[in-house]
Image (cartoon, rainbow, N blue to C red):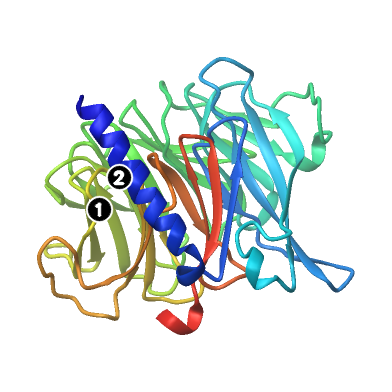
Amino acid sequence: MESKVEEHIIEEEYKIWRKNVPHLYDLMYTQTLKWPTPSIQWFPEVQRVENQKSVQRLLTTTFSNGLEKEQLLISQISFPDTVDEDSLNNADIDFKITQSIPLSSDANRCLYCPLATNIIACRTESSDVLIYDYTEHPSFNSSKAPDAVLKGHTDGGFAVDWNHMIFGQLVTGGRDKMVNVFDINNGILFSKSYHSQIVNDVSYSRHNPNVFCSVSDDLRIAVNDTRNITSTVTLEKAHLRSIECCTFSPFKSELLATGSSDSVIKVWDIRSLETPLFVLRGHKDTLITLKWSPHYESLLASCSRDRRVIIWDLNKTDSCSGDQSPETLFIHGGHTNLVDDVDWNPCEPMEIASVSCDNVLQVWKIPLDNYI
């Protein structure tokens, strides 16, 4: 009975959101995928075609739950320069898959190397970290094995991030409670147990190639420096429940955001971790992903099991009022199931791609003038 009531509420909320789409968005595009994708990432380049449209690419994976062999997918999405106001939703936008690479294990998160976007790291359900160079694989029906397999974990996981300043270096974590730093050519550089439970996420600093953060079910934040792995800065009980995600700011080296299954986001100054700078309340379920805007240093996007994507503006205020923090800038209500991942379009300010576990991909953009 409760599930029927919940389904009815979700349906009614979606109808209200759908009715208001023309008033809320500059762009709203929805694509139903064959399978859910646990991760999504925009590639950084834009191609102009016939001086009439822009073409961008997206990196995704499939999760068929064993019904098919999982795939690493590269998709192309074309945006026309002009859109008829009467056809705002999905107006003349073309989406197609341009490359499909079979994966040797279920991929939980895939990221391209920021210093060479053809190289992709996949953190999988197996203990191995898989590395693919998509230029070495045909567009379809590839039978080629991964271009590199990084060994060092004893179990799978979700945590992976590339070093933004040292080519080919990445940090990973997982269910074995270990944090490993790899070089794609030389294998594991070091391995250390900073946590007593599952490592859910890792993030490299964008400003210091030696600094990364890891977060875990053990409620601990660990800020690590590869130049001295014994001098880790940790904060115990940083959240009330398991910490699910973390991300360093691309603009300010000291800022770190963490999200938890307690539904709360906290923004920290890693130089002094005792008290968070911001406590962001608004989600009603477990946080899944946090992403800083690549264009505006005060903006942060988050997604959750509550079916919502929230954009936060840390410039609004740092005080809390009731259940909704005043830093809340925009709530995207277009998904009817938990949102697995979000990513800011690096080429279009205020444009986001989000994916949910019911196979839905959405690309949406809110009016810049209304919010910035």
Report helix, strand or loop for mark 2: loop
Choose top left, top right, bottom left or bottom right for residue 264.
bottom left
CA–CA distance between discs 1 and 2?
A: 7 Å
Residue 201 x %, y %: 36, 43
Residue type, mark 2 in image:
Asp
Residue 312 x %, y %: 33, 68
Residue visible at 13% across and 70% down? Answer: 320
- State which quarter of the image contains the N terminus: top left
184 relative to 301 in the view: left or right = right
Write down the residue under mark 2.
306
Is 63 drawn above or below residue 253 in the view shown?
Answer: above
Write down the residue under mark 1.
283
Residue visible at 16% across and 41% down? Answer: 241
Residue 70 x %, y %: 61, 24
Residue type, mark 1 in image:
His
Q: Categorize mark 2 by other alpha carbons within 10 Å: few (<14), some (14-19), many (20+).
A: some
**Between residues 67 and 127, which one lies in front from this camera angle?**
67
Choose top left, top right, bottom left or bottom right for residue 33.
top right
- State which quarter of the image contains the C terminus: bottom left
